[in-house]
Image (cartoon, helix red, strand yellow):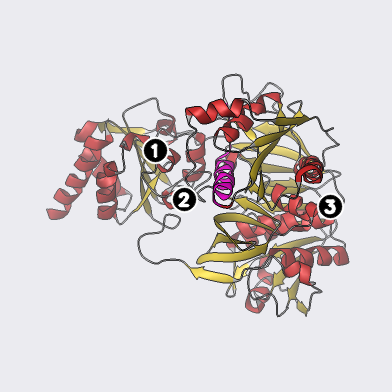
Amino acid sequence: MKVLVCIKSVPAVAGRITLTADARAVDTRHLGFTIGPHEECAVEQAVRLVEEHGGEAVVLTLGPAPALEQLRDAMALGIARAIHLVTDGEDWDSQSTVEAIVEAVRADEAASGRFDLVLLGNEAADSGGYQTAVRLGRSLGRPTVTGIKGLTLVDGVVRCEQEVPGGRDVYALPLPAVVAVLEGLNVPRFPSVPGRLRAKSKPVAVSTPTRPAQRLELLRLAVPEGRSKQAVVLGRGPDAAPAVVAVLNDLGVL
Amino acid sequence: MAAVLVYVTSADGVVDEVALQALALAGQLAGEGAVHALVIGDEAAAASLGPWGAAQVHLARHEALGSTAPDAAARILDDLAGRLGVGAVIGPGTDLGNTVIARAAARAGLPFAANCTSATPGHPMTVTRLRWGGSLLEEAAIHADRAMLTVAPHSVAARQTGGAAPVEAFTPELDAADLVVRAVERIPAARGGVSLADARVVVSGGRGVGSQAGFAPIEELAGLLGAAVGCSRAVTISGWRPHTDQVGQTGTKIAPELYIACGISGATQHLAGCKGAKKILAINKDPEAPIMSAADFVVIGDLHEVVPAISAEIRRVRGA
């Protein structure tokens, strides 16, 4: 089978996020980049599907030149090759992103056959748009499910499980299909040293799509006001236990 | 502005809380325009909407809509929005709300802003929305004749207007293609234990716990308090606890009375999941850890010594 997994390179934020002077982006001068948690699970699933059923897994990103590092990370885990839609680093809304991905998918499918499955993260860690998968599915005319935490493939049907209040809904989609997954779908593996070395020589197809006018246009970002509070220090080490229990009592949770 | 249509989700006659919040945002946006509500299948829910700001309720009834069918819901919503000529469609910022509004936007070729905390009418309409699970706010302009958006949970207060709304039932037009994506089975959740999302107290462990076995004192304290056990992402990716225990942007978002964070540094991803807690107690060796400035109470020390001491003290107090 042929599987495509779409990822996004995002800043590896840890503590408080700081912004650039124009407040249009996260200040990444002191940050590394990473793949979002949902997408790490999508990559792992793509690798497992190909291990189990044979075929080829391809990774795609739309992002600036340094996002190549995240493509290599995915290839280090067992993805065969990459498609890099290179941008100048500006924010792309979901509609523009999907237009570019659709063009790349059509070109790849014309050359080497249809993707049976396209996997994405449910929502990007940074922009949280909740829509790229369904737009892609709609444009490609393929059934799409979102929020998936369980995925099995049997006889050309992909069985997907989605947590809902009170249990799990099960969907059975004919292939080709588009599936947006959540962290918890699997436990992603760590790259091996040989995997990292192999990834360096795997092929990356590069193109530079044109960014159209943005219909969901980012104007500016802001860091929300934190709860400005001064924590009460209850003590140091095990001697603090009586003070902690007094607080539990005051809060009515004892 | 023009009328606004709200996609109202419900279960067994009870309207989702976030859908009522969507109605409140619709009221703010519509001004003199009418607020329409779409309910799929649930007659009791439809009948209950008048006091929450809906002027007209549309109840879609179709034999194929017994289980979750997000493309069908999107088709119904898009068709109704077109028929009513609304200027905005608003849904709840839940899993179902986000996927259905996204699908309706994709059908209509319109932009979609998920998880908005406010919206200002105009040309273009501007919204404030959540990024990074709420760790950042984005101000955005929606360039479209019809704005498609969802409201972030608990960012707009539901508002009782005390009105009444007529309910008009109709049979929507659906094709086979709209029903390809449809739940074929519902697996009920396993019962037992305290659910993380609903727990009054959550005791969580982070990287500082050190191992799977290291969770024993955390489980002991949770047991004494009738609390749920949680963890940080560092713990799940190490394989010490299942992902269902993870508190954070990509795990469970919790809102307990008290959150006890043991050996958790407090990365942005984690704080996005526990900021709904009324009070936070942090136990950490590092007084400079980010969790310490998010907490109400802190104990500086090794959780492996502090947590068992707290459990022992609870037993002592209760025994007395």
Going by the image, does B274 lie left or right of B14?
Answer: left
Q: Is residue A1 above or below residue A191?
A: below
Going by the image, does A136 lie left or right of A127?
Answer: right
Going by the image, does A152 lie left or right of B234?
Answer: right
Q: Amino acid at mark 2?
A: Ile
SS state under label 2: loop
Q: Nearer the viewer, mark 1 or mark 3?
A: 3
Q: Amino acid at mark 3?
A: Gly
Residue that badge 2 annotates: B254
Cβ atoms at labels 2 and 3 below 8 Å apart: no
Q: Position of residue B1 (x, y in %)?
A: 84, 54
Q: Which chain does the numbered disc 2 sit on?
A: B
Q: CA distance from mark 1 to mark 2?
A: 16 Å
SS state under label 3: loop
Looking at the image, is mark 1 or mark 2 earlier in the sequence? 2
Asked whether residue B158 is in view, the answer is: no
Q: Nearer the viewer, mark 1 or mark 2?
A: 2
Q: Which chain does the numbered disc 1 sit on?
A: B
- Looking at the rendering, the stretch of residues picked out in magenta corresponds to A33-52
